[in-house]
Image (tube, grey):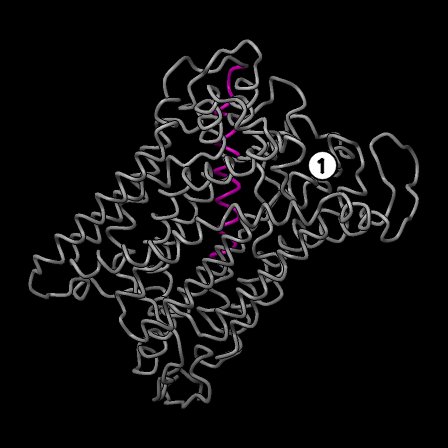
Amino acid sequence: MQPQVLVQQSPRGADGGVVAKVVGVLLLLPAAVLTIITLVVPTGRTVGTSMRAESFLARGEAEYVGFDNFDAVVEGGFWSALGFAVSLVLLPIVVAVVIAPLLAAAFEWAGGWARVTARVVLSLAIVVFSPVALAIAWQRALREEPELLADPDLAGGVVWSSLAFMTFGVVCAVGVMVFLPAFRARRKLFPTLFTIAGLVVLGLLAVGLQQFTVPFAMTGFGPADATMTPAGMMFTTAFANGRIGAGAAVATLLLLFLAVLGIVAVLVVILTRLRVSVRPWRSSGSGAPVNAGAIVVAVLALVAVLVVAWITMAPWFDALGGPEPEGPAGADGRTWPPALLAALVSVGVAYFGALGVSGLRPLGRHSEWLLMPFAPWLFVGVAPLGIEFFKSLRDEGKLDGSVFPPILVSLVSLLVLAVLCRGQAERWQQQTAAGAPVAGSFFRTVVLPTLPPAVLLFVVTAFLNAQDLFWGLLTAQSPENVTTPMLLFTANADLTGETYSVASATPLVAVVLGFVALGAIQALHLDRMTATVGRVDDPTGPIRLPVSQ
């Protein structure tokens, strides 16, 4: 056995060998299987249900009615519900693509300490964000003027403005996080900023289309359907009115819009060649002289954001007082362990899939096209598939108390981590072209730098799982099986008028641990990340591989 110099035709495909391609596909396989089981199959069943006159009251085989259910829901207000859902995220979109980039520019201009301080401070807005707690808090704040939520002409605007206020802090925090890497790279700055902004807009539109918790907790989608959303229309049609077929028709239309958004998002990533890489420790600081003016601007910007966030969160602060909601013991135990385990599985398989697709690059420069089959379900959450998830649990006799999240792959994490692995793979290819060991350099250059962002996505996904009200509404059939969001919601709906603290939405230990984790990852790792778009020069030179004589 002697080393020979082999010149590879496609350095983007790792060493160009069969092993890298096979391993890459195998790493993607778990994500593909879970996508089929928990997303593709329920989607097909939802479409099938939408064409039958199925209901909870009728027994036996449901009659096939073709597109009659679609005609009924379109005539029943689907388009107005869709328009209201989109309107809910218009102001958050402005905050995300206008205010957040300006904040990121100010923090980058001021230097490393400003970036790190802003990242850490704004991380708190992410871990305390609880849609059900915020919706309850805002509803209580409006109780002195009940006509605001009771008048159909006013309720929509009140919910619209309330959601904009309650999301200001978290949108700024996430926006600064995603835009800072573009300013850090400073290469093709404006194309990169526009690419990231486009992805943010697509993501927020998907969130708006699936909005459920805030209008449901504040108004119950009333009065007179003034605050109805597509997810709410699906829920009330199928579960309140018992018309499963019509509810599935709403879900199918919603899935169609989400599929378009997901396909566009993945195409943007592929066609722009968006990639993120991590700078070495020694180059994390700019070494530039201190700019007093930039520091003043950064301080003023951060203070302004904190003041506005404090004001917009005032109802939430007021609602932190009062007794804990009464209910069966163990609500946190039914909420957080399943949320953590589901996040571990969903982000874990996404991480391995990203390593396989954009790390090992089995198709070379075309590897990211392997993400396209996942694109239609990129933004799909539990709500559009809730009918089929509910029916599956009912048929298996596992309905009551099945609090484990039903979607076991995070496709958003897959896309984000693939973008990061793509940037690191370029460095790995350069190292292997210079003669570095393939396996060792892959672990050091691709696996280790992408692991902290995967942990961050795990934390965020776990918090999102734990704050989900929709799934608890479907599965908690008895009081002893309610989750924490369900407990808060039912306590707030108590006609006795008792006001309970919303602090239990996120236990203090979860807030502390989540804040420490996010703050540390942002300060020590994400601050070294750079983002850019466009073609990159292929690394040239031979890769040394051991070849048998």
Name which residue lies at 39% across and 58% down: 97
Name which residue lies at 44% across and 80% down: 12
Residue 371 occupies quadrant:
bottom right
Query: Is residue 332 rendered magenta in the image?
Result: yes
Residue 318 occupies quadrant:
top left
Comparing 129 with 373, the one in front is 129
Residue 132, compared with residue 410, is above or below; it is: above
| Secondary structure of the residue carrying numbered label 1 | helix
Q: State the predominant SS element of the stretch in magenta.
A: helix
Comparing 465 with 133, the one in front is 133
Q: What residue type is labelled 1?
A: Phe
Quadrant where the image shows the C terminus: bottom left
Residue 33 place in picture, x, y as percent: 64, 56
Query: Is residue 446 rendered magenta in the image?
Result: no
Q: Which residue is label 1 attached to?
A: 390
Residue 491 place in picture, x, y as percent: 53, 17
Residue extending farthest to the front is: 153
Tally the numbered discs.
Answer: 1
Residue 456 place in picture, x, y as percent: 38, 48
Comparing 3 with 11, the one in front is 11
Name which residue lies at 44% across and 26% down: 137
Query: Relative to residue 101, is residue 49 drawn left or right?
Result: right
- Chain part drawn in magenta: 328-351
Residue 347 place in picture, x, y as percent: 49, 50
Residue 387, compared with residue 284, is above or below; it is: above
Quadrant where the image shows the N terminus: bottom left
